[in-house]
Image (tube, grey):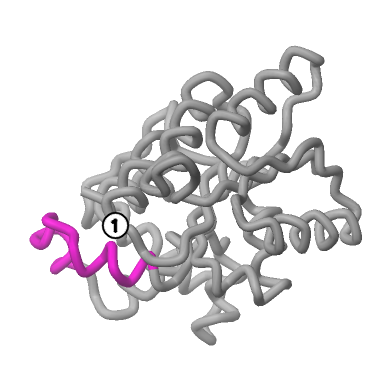
Amino acid sequence: MRVILAEDSTLLREGLIRLLVEEGHEVLDAVGDGDALVRAVRTAAAAGAPPDVVCVDVRMPPTHTDEGLRAALAIRESWPSVGVLVLSQYVEKSYAGELITSGRERIGYLLKDRVMRVEEFLDALERVGSGGVALDPEVVRQLLSRTTHTDPLERLTTREREVLAAMAEGHNNQSIADRLYISPSAVEKHVNSIFDKLDLSHSPGYNRRIRAVVTYLTT
């Protein structure tokens, strides 16, 4: 995949460059602030080869508040085909919610501790780049705990909530089955039950899995 990195820590940025290159990915650019990230994406897009994914820290210069997030949202608006994988030191709930509700696919939010687990980071990158969702399990846990849609979620069984949490992390049915030690057909049954209980009818134009996650875990 073609990747652009935005991370103000030189040590982490250089480490990610080396890791991605070793894994066969192409790092188009690596920058240290949000404005530079947007410029890098614009340049690549103008050349006809936009990145598949951008990896961006939430807090970047000059104020170290939400520069990375604002850059990520700008990229999603101008180049919706570009996946966005946000890296953060902590679970910043409002930022995670704002990013996730900005679109239906190609989004990820990982804690930086997860980046140190190389296989998990690379798996998340692949998921986002291929059009999926990858949320850190801790992000999912905290978003579940803050949801205001208590009534619909209370309809779910414990197992259905486990399946929904795994869906939020970006796992497909087979992966969920492996994680929960149940059959793929049982997973499919739980997923369909979740859709029914959350009143998500099948309609063209949106992915019900992602709609379930976005609507009920981030609002």
The residue wearing badge 1 is: 93
Q: Is mark 1 on a helix, strand or loop?
A: helix
Q: Which residue lies furthest to the front in this view?
A: 62
200 or 5, which is in the foreground? 5
**Horizontal side, residue 50 vs residue 36: left or right:** right
Q: Which residue lies furthest to the bottom in this view?
A: 181
Looking at the image, residue 170 lies above or below residue 70:
below
Secondary structure mostly seen in magenta is: helix
Q: What stretch is highlighted in magenta?
A: 139-155
**Horizontal side, residue 140 vs residue 147: left or right:** right
Looking at the image, residue 173 lies above or below residue 198:
below
46 or 15, which is in the foreground? 15
Q: Which quadrant is the N terminus positioned in? A: top right
x and y percentages locating residue 39 in the rendered image: 64, 23
The residue type indicated by label 1 comes to Lys
x and y percentages locating residue 91 in the rendered image: 36, 64
The residue positioned 44% from the left and 71% from the top of the image is 137
x and y percentages locating residue 178 in the rendered image: 60, 80
Q: Residue furthest left?
A: 151
The residue positioned 82% from the left and 62% from the top of the image is 19
